[in-house]
Image (tube, rainbow, N blue to C red):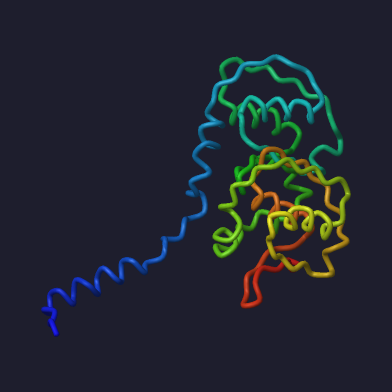
Amino acid sequence: MRLLSAAAVSLAVCVSAQAMQFPKPVRPGEEPWRKPFNAALEKKISGDAKKPLAEMLDWFCEQAGVTFVVDPSALERAPTVTLTAKAIAVGPALKQLLTPLGLEYQVRDMAVFIFDPKKLDKTMLTPEDLPIARLLDNREEVLNFEPDKMPAGDAIKQLTEQPGIKLAVDEALKKTPVTLKLKDIRLGYAIRWVVRYAGGKIIVDRDGMKVVKR
């Protein structure tokens, strides 16, 4: 029987340990998907228009080329807004549009999220846990999904049934109506937005993934 030298054994153990290393957690704000969003907010645009807010945000979405998620409560007044922009970056132009209305935006969960900070449940801005990111965020499916007062249980079932994602939903959340307009967004993030608007969060335990109340 051939014996390995101490150096060879040491090297084998080192290689084995390296092979077993897990990927380092990504810090919030440094996720790879943010790069095109940061670039989109720096893109220069020009425009001179007077339109309802919803139409203007659709225009911004088209100009930026990234997903926008708008909190329905931000559109409750549905004001007509005016924009005059000449070679201004999308980010500052969007802020210029939203600030007089008391609205804000954040880049989060693969979308530019527009909301009214006075009406928004602050728990909706809480980052999700890393295990959820591993299980959902890398899904490649891109879709449009526009539930209108749809029970959260039905919305989640519609999103998860065909791709075969197992996600148990708390009975207390299944009947909560959800209204959203999601465009060109990856499946994992669409699920997370629906869960968030239902007042829930996704957890992972020994029984798998489940949606529970926040």
**Residue 114 position by quadrant:** top right
Left/right of residue 55 with respect to residue 188 in the rendered view:
right
Up the image or down, 88 lies above or below 122; here it is above
User: Which of 184 and 102 lies nearest the eye of the viewer?
Assistant: 184
Quadrant occupied by the N terminus: bottom left
Residue at x 36% of width, y 69% of height = 20
Left/right of residue 127 with respect to residue 116 in the rendered view:
left
Residue at x 72% of width, y 38% of height = 103
Residue 24 appears at what percent x and percent y? 41, 61
Residue at x 65% of width, y 43% of height = 142
Q: How many marks?
A: 0
Residue 65 appears at what percent x and percent y? 61, 30
Residue at x 73% of width, y 43% of height = 115
Left/right of residue 109 with respect to residue 17 in the rendered view:
right
Quadrant occupied by the C terminus: bottom right
Residue 34 appears at what percent x and percent y? 52, 43
Up the image or down, 85 lies above or below 13; here it is above
Q: Residue farthest to the bottom? A: 1
User: Which of 125 and 174 lies nearest the eye of the viewer?
Assistant: 174
Up the image or down, 210 lies above or below 183; here it is below
**Residue 92 position by quadrant:** top right
Residue 196 appears at what percent x and percent y? 73, 56
Left/right of residue 113 with respect to residue 80 in the rendered view:
left
User: Which of 174 and 87 lies nearest the eye of the viewer?
Assistant: 174
**Residue 77 position by quadrant:** top right
Q: Residue farthest to the front? A: 1
